[in-house]
Image (cartoon, rainbow, N blue to C red):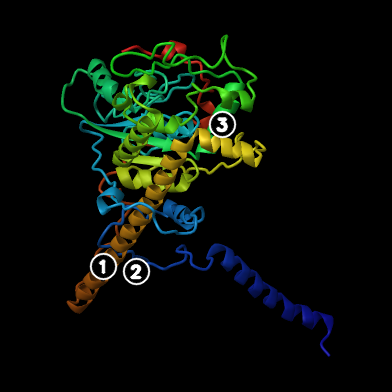
Amino acid sequence: MMDDRSSKLILVPILAVLFVMIGYQYICPAGSNSCHFKAEEKLRGVSLLSTPYQDSDDFYRDQDLEDDSPPKLPSKFNFTERDLDRHVEFDIKGDDVIVFLHIQKTGGTTFGRHLVRNIRLEQPCDCKPGQKKCTCHRPGKEESWLFSRFSTGWSCGLHADWTELTNCVPVIMDKKEAQRNTRNFYYITMLRDPVSRYLSEWKHVQRGATWKTALHMCDGRSPTQDELPNCYIGDDWSGVTLTEFMNCPSNLANNRQVRMLADLSLVGCYNLSSMNESQRNHILLSSAMSNLKNMAFYGLTEFQRKTQYMFERTFSLRFIAAFTQINSTRAANVDLSEPVRRRIEELNYLDVQLYEYAKDLFLQRFQFTRQREHQEVRLKRREERRWLKEQKEQGRPWPPKHKGGGNAGGRRGGGSEKGTEGEFPTTTEDYTSQVARW
């Protein structure tokens, strides 16, 4: 029999091997891309073709991109390749402008901060502590490349919708800047599950928030009191119950996403007597779907990592820090009975249809972009192997190893994030002093 000392000597290496094997499973899980050895790592760092989206900070993103994907189902919509391919040649040094349409309670505040504080740029936005707006100028110019709440403020009115922005933004940009070149406006927005968004707006209003300074401009004027009656008497609707919130027929929370994305001039703006309700709703939903599909980009609150991925691939811009998925929200903590949930869905049945359409298109765009990117990577690796084989057959010496990391054609710029999230001033929904009439 072996003594205790011999047993321990045998047991130690066995435990060490087990520890290494367990650790390897965590570091290199099955199906992961994180432990693949690349050709350039084996061959003295030689790389013929750059891969702009394969930086080291992509590994953790790519591993997690599939985690929040729902099971793949047949699409209800016949999208074309043109609908799915949303890459744009955004020229930040030229005349291109990103316009962010911020719909209430869709995570727009968080996304808006990403735009001004979290993009790698040659000339990052200048965000000073204590100030609500950042200066986002083109490199070497006194011109803005971003039109959003945190860059230009509420220049077209508080939470301006598609109808307001498309009429107002070109006018405001011409007033702010001397140049009169033809600009390319790239509209973007965020959408959210309609029930969650509705509950979030109710909780927000319940705490005393209002958007009563919103202009709701359409066809050159704001709606009259008869066209858009108030749901409450007094300064705000603090303490409103969910039942009271649902019972107000003029509550703009109902189908807010469709209304804010549609061309309201097609239905007589806020004049409900211009046509019957069925016809009005059909036109609004069709318009919202068309405008959303034709936007340069939109994201979904429920898919933060995919939203980041799609924005980066659409505009060839890169974020510094990864987006975070936060599912513990006030809306998520509301205990809903099934009848109440059905009532909310009925009140927002246009938004429900829009979100189903938007989610289907978004996930198909994501899948299309991922597949195309994987094909490009495989093609580049095949071309690289062919080139290396030719070099070996011709007996040429290895080219020197490149120092430093490439910038993928200089797309990403050399900016760094300034400040921290904690330094950004706390925002409220009282923007009366910031709203400009146009």
The quadrant of the rendering that contains the C terminus is: top left
Which residue bears the numbered disc 2? 39
Query: Looking at the image, do the residues carrying marks 2 and 1 touch, with CB atoms under 8 Å apart?
Result: yes
The quadrant in which residue 333 appears is top right
Which residue bears the numbered disc 3? 200
Instruction: Tell me the tag on residue 384.
Output: 1
> Helix, strand, or loop for circle 2?
helix
**Quick one: label 3 or label 1, which is nearer the N terminus?**
3
**Quick one: label 2 or label 1, which is nearer the N terminus?**
2
Amino acid type indicated by mark 2: Ala
Asked if residue 238 shows in the view, the reply is: yes
Q: As displayed, is residue 261 above or below residue 435? A: below
Looking at this view, is 392 or 400 the one in front?
392
Amino acid type indicated by mark 1: Glu
Badge 1: how crowded within 10 Å, few (<14), some, or many (20+)?
some
Q: Name the mark nearer the viewer: 3 or 1.
A: 3
